[in-house]
Amino acid sequence: MLLPGMLYFLVYKYLPMYGAVIAFKDFSINDGILGSSWANPWYKHFKYFYDSPYFAQVMTNTLLISIYKLFWLMPTSILLAILLSEIRWKPFRNIVQSILYMPHFISWVIILGISLALFSEADGLINTMLKDWGLHSFPFLTSNEWIRSLLVGSDLWQNMGWGAIVYLAAIAGIDPTLYEAARVDGAGRLRMIWHITLPGIRNVIVLMLILRMGTILDAGFEQIYVMYNIQVYEKADIIDTWVFRTGLEQFNFSLGAAVGLYKSIIALTLVVTANAIAKRWGESIW
């Protein structure tokens, strides 16, 4: 029964790791991985990334957008899971859950269309209402002041319902006799949430936080590539979009591999560090 899963990870996860060697080569499609010459010096492509005048900008944007998403998405998903678990009428809860899950299955292209319909400076619904009220419009989609809020807000809208699933499952696993005992002792709903629900899902929260640290440099390529534009590069251009423009669109695959390897090393370091810190509090993955 384990064989299909093991083969999947072997074929699609482990064997492709050999391709990371092109980060240390001047890769040519015609010559292939083995035939391409080694870069001189070996850190040539890493140095190109570090020496780029956009390095500080894309690193800052990546970290800030990713941290903003983490800061808003995790607490919101936890709160949403707790609120859903408190709904006693099951049909109503199922309807609410379905409505909250649906945005997760909407592509970013469709979400861009929704954003244009709502936030376009020329004829977006919100700006049209502001003009009708005698106020000036805001360039939400083309302003450095608003683009990060729009990115974080749209990501929150799409994923908070989906992110609540794992916390709902953890809440369902809490022993119901604990709530019965607390109720007998006179505890209200807020007391039970604070003293039973949150401690009961603490290990899942720590687990999700540790795993999220491994993707801290993945700020959401698909979303940002679809929603950003040249006017907001200063605040929205991240590592992945910069590499796509500078590396892949110009067939500089070695640069893309070098940056990908750099991100993987940072992610591994952050996960191991976060796990070590969590272990001091009695919660860890390994």
Image (cartoon, grey):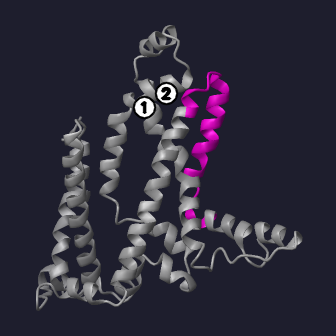
Q: Is residue 267 above or below residue 120?
A: above
The quadrant of the rendering that contains the C terminus is top left
- Judge left or right: residue 238 versus residue 130: left
Q: In the current view of this chain or complex, which residue is farthest to the front?
A: 186
Residue 64 - label: none
Helix or strand or loop: what does disc 1 sit on? helix
Residue that mark 1 sits on: 198
What percent of the width, then of the height, locates residue 180? 48, 11
Residue under the point 62% across and 23% down: 90
The quadrant of the rendering that contains the N terminus is top left
- Judge left or right: residue 109 versus residue 206: right
Any magenta on residue 109?
A: yes
Residue under the point 63% across and 30% down: 93
Helix or strand or loop: what does disc 2 sit on? helix
Residue under the point 40% across and 24% down: 173
Q: Is residue 22 above or below residue 17?
A: below
- Judge left or right: residue 232 versus residue 256: right
Q: Nearer the viewer, residue 243 or 207?
A: 207
Q: Is residue 228 visible?
A: yes
Q: Counting other residues with Cα less than 10 Å from the Cα at mark 2, is it few (<14), some (14-19), or many (20 or more)?
A: some
Q: Which residues are magenta?
A: 83-110
Residue that mark 2 sits on: 193
Q: Is residue 105 visible?
A: no
